[in-house]
Image (cartoon, grey):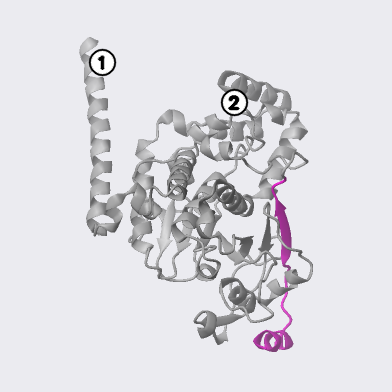
Amino acid sequence: MHYFERVCNGMPSGVVSFERKVLPFKDNSFPIVYPKASFWSESRIPLCPFKVMETGTIEDHEKEALEVDFANAYLGGGALSKGCVQEEIRFMINPELIAGMLFFPAMQDNEAIEIVGAERFSKYEGYASGFLFAGDYVDTRCHDFCGRRETKMVAIDALCYPGEGQFRYQKLIREVNKAFCGFLDHTEIHGYFKFINKVGIDTEQHEWRGNYDRARCKSEIVGTVAMQQNVGGNNLVAEEDEECSGSDKNSISNRFSQQIEIAEPSVLRDEISNEIAQRRLGGENDGAQDLCLHPPLNNIGIATGNWGCGAFGGDVELKSMLQWLAASQASRPFVLYFTFEHTFSERLIVFTEWIRCHGWTVGELWGMLMEYSSQRLEGNVYACFFEWVLPRINRGVNLEQYKSSLQSNRTSKKNEKRATKNYAQEEDGSSQ
């Protein structure tokens, strides 16, 4: 009713776009196909910064991020009936989303839906049976060059009531690929490969993704200064810049980006072909090996939360890690994770801090999830994933003390590097 009151007083302007995103199971015109397990296990991409938001909601975040809709396979779920959880609430406060329910069939396992430009009209309080309209909301987000408000959403549907089956290999692949399909910037991928084809570079040669993965140092994927300076919660430490070598910062991707602007197509083709020939990786291409070779890294992160949990019954620790993997692999610069005051918030903060401190990659975290899931299904482990990896998380560890120890470890590493560097300089001086 409130929406129609607003519309009668002044017709909204602008555009809302709906995009069906697909990772094809077989090769077609899209350069990436549905990833296999080897794609995840062999990834060397570092995990992106991960900030836990213990309060607030996805739609109220202050960063530029793709907002996750915990969707039903049928877009909108019960928005026009009795549903009143995360997706339905979002469709009530942004009622232009309802238009998509008219023309989208059910999403398949390899599909997601991205919606850009929906205006918010209402405030609200509560959740589920406690949901209440709380007044008018004036959306102040800017419009892009297409006339769309800069509100970007992606609908991804999780497994419903998966039980212990969610730890099976097929289910893990399904969930991480579902999130990956939604988080991946399909437009940017299309644009990059269109350029590659235009200048005559054979995309089949681009099996040097591992080199690109290694070249992406952690400092390059810290999204914003505000994220780096964040206090409390998860600290996205800027000191990691000092731990990246000069050769890392002069990465393949940076050189490639510069060459695109200054080189003739024939020069660019020869340069990249030589790079590939010198650094080519062996192994079977599983159809997704060309991912993340596109030089530009956008600054749009992911704003998400307990996707597939709550009403859908998923394991909150498992789902948070799968989303982290997908966001990192999709080159997203950060994840804002809203726990909605869930009791696992502190454990999530400690766990993600520990993982980031130790420089884990996507492949390493995926490997741990696979090992844990296998042992859990065999009945060899009953602990949750975080406790299985870090037993002391559930043993009353003091969060502030733990953060202090992490900072001390970083300081010790930097001092050790400086001492080694000074010693090497002294040796060089004495030899001269």
The part of the image, by quadrant, that contains residue 155 is: bottom right
Residue 382 colored magenta? Answer: no
Q: Quickly name the residue at label 1.
A: 428
| Left or right of 4, for residue 209 | left
Does residue 230 appear anywhere in the picture?
Answer: no
Q: Quickly name the residue at label 2.
A: 283
Q: Nearer the viewer, residue 89 or 344?
A: 344
Question: Which residues, given as a range, are shown in magenta?
Answer: 1-24
Does residue 203 appear anywhere in the picture?
Answer: yes
Q: The residue under label 1 is which amino acid type?
A: Asp
Give the residue displayed 33% in from the left and 55% down from the top: 350
Q: Which of 248 and 429 is in front in this view?
A: 248
Tag 2, which secondary structure? loop
Residue 11 spot, x, y in % from top left: 74, 81
Tag 1, which secondary structure? helix
| Left or right of 329, for residue 187 | right
Give the residue displayed 25% in from the left and 21% down from the top: 424
> Mark 1 or mark 2, which is nearer the start of the sequence?
2
Question: Badge 1, how many Cα within 10 Å: few under 14, some, many 20+?
Answer: few
Image quarter hosting the C terminus: top left
Residue 166 versus residue 258 in the image, above or below:
below
Question: Badge 2, how many Cα within 10 Å: few under 14, some, many 20+?
Answer: few
Residue 111 spot, x, y in % from top left: 69, 54
Q: Which of 404 and 195 is in front in this view?
A: 404
Give the residue displayed 78% in from the left and 41% down from the top: 29
| Left or right of 33, for residue 123 | left
Label ID, residue 117: none
Residue 355 spot, x, y in % from top left: 38, 46
Contact, mark 2 vs mark 1 (Cβ under 8 Å): no
Residue 275 spot, x, y in % from top left: 59, 22
Residue 156 versus residue 421 in the image, above or below:
below
> How many numbered markers are drawn?
2
